[in-house]
Amino acid sequence: MHDVVDLRSDTLTTPTPEMRAAMAAAEVGDDVWEEDPTVKRLEAMAAERLGKEAALFVASGTMGNQVAVMTHTRPGQEVIVDADAHIYMFEVGGIARLSLCQVRPLPTERGLPSPEQVRQAIRPSNIHVPPTGLLCLENTHNRHSGSAFTPEEVTAAARVAREHGVPVHLDGARIFNAAVALRRDASEFCREVDSVQFCLSKGLAAPVGSLVVGTRGFIAEARRNRKLLGGGMRQVGVLAAAGIVALERMVDRLAEDHANAKRLAEGISRMPGIRVDLSRIQTNIVIFHVDRPGGVQELVEGCRARKVKLHAIGPAAIRCVTHKDVDAEDIERALAAIEEVVAAWA
């Protein structure tokens, strides 16, 4: 029984007892010297799971994405992204500040640029325009209700870029949510991309960390850029140990989060004055819209008073994210709290 039902994000997951035990017992060394055996084991596991040659443990998904962009690009190039992509919207302008690159945001219906959009966005050889340096994709897509794109959809967009000599980075912060939801191996989503970042600290419930995967040469250069950003973390096997447990134990249970998100969305969809597109609920993110002026703030505050935490992502929208610390009973409590607040509007 959880005292508070916290649906603000899956970053709020707490480590499991098995993770804590593994952290306490972890064998460690200096990772900057590449001598931490637990980190090396985690990196090897990550590379194998996603079908790449090598991997690099980083402090966060944002660090992983920005290290990847820095490694792929040169200053003055342009990076193609979806207009709602996390790497563009929520990483503090890192592409501009760290890589000195311009961003080309493309509006999309579901969060994934079509092959034709990619083709049209790639710059021609012209002295007046910045050369295209990178295509960034996101799967699942945070701002599009956790949309999960099939390996075929990812491949179609990525191949256009690669045909033009443009590398592709996949922000796969929740790539295992996509894999579980679509019942595909995680490596299938990564075949046509050059690098991938995925998070251990979201649905997989580790306390800290993400991985960047790619070729050995790419990861060697990414390691240098990680150091530049202050990411040399020394005896970090104490954190990597939790990541190993996350990959071994926490992937398959993501299906529970997806089922809870569907139940939450279905319940909300029946409430007056609230709109949610059930066709978009594929994974663990539910975004819904409130028609009542000021209703978002009233709903957030009213639910908080009832020990349910929601996250406003705009003046008329709320995002809820299910995770291992929210069970089926918590979903019913959340629905009851939301319904109570909505009923007062009648």
Image (cartoon, rainbow, N blue to C red):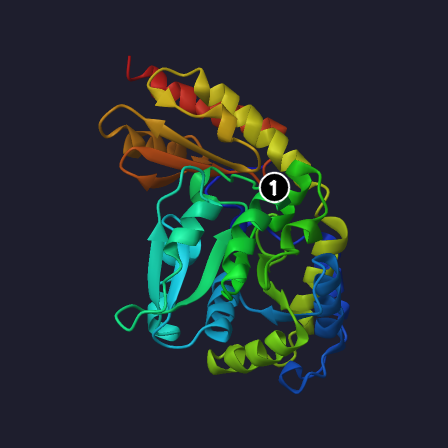
Of all residues, the one furthest to the top in this rendering is 346
What SS does tag 1 mark? loop
* Type of amino acid under label 1: Thr
Specify the quadrant that holds the C terminus: top left
Of all residues, the one furthest to the left in this rendering is 293
Asked if residue 7 lies left or right of residue 24, the reply is: left
* Residue 173 vertical placement versus 299 (above, below): below
How many callouts does the rendering have?
1
Of all residues, the one furthest to the front in this rendering is 125
Of all residues, the one furthest to the bottom in this rendering is 33
Q: Residues within 10 Å of mark 1 (few under 14, many from 20)?
A: some
What residue do we see at 62% from left, 28% from top?
A: 328
- Image coordinates of residue 129 in percent, x first then y, are 29, 68
Asked if residue 324 can be seen in this view, the reply is no
The foreground one among 145 and 300 is 145
- Image coordinates of residue 230 in percent, x first then y, are 48, 79
- Image coordinates of residue 223 in percent, x first then y, are 58, 79
The foreground one among 147 and 118 is 118
Residue 78: image quadrant is bottom left
Specify the quadrant that holds the N terminus: top right
What residue do we see at 41% from left, 55% from top?
A: 81
- Image coordinates of residue 149 in percent, x first then y, are 56, 42
Q: Disc 1 designates what residue?
A: 150
The foreground one among 4 and 78 is 78
* Residue 128 vertical placement versus 228 (above, below): above
Asked if residue 67 can be seen in this view, the reply is yes
The foreground one among 335 and 95 is 95
Residue 242: image quadrant is bottom right
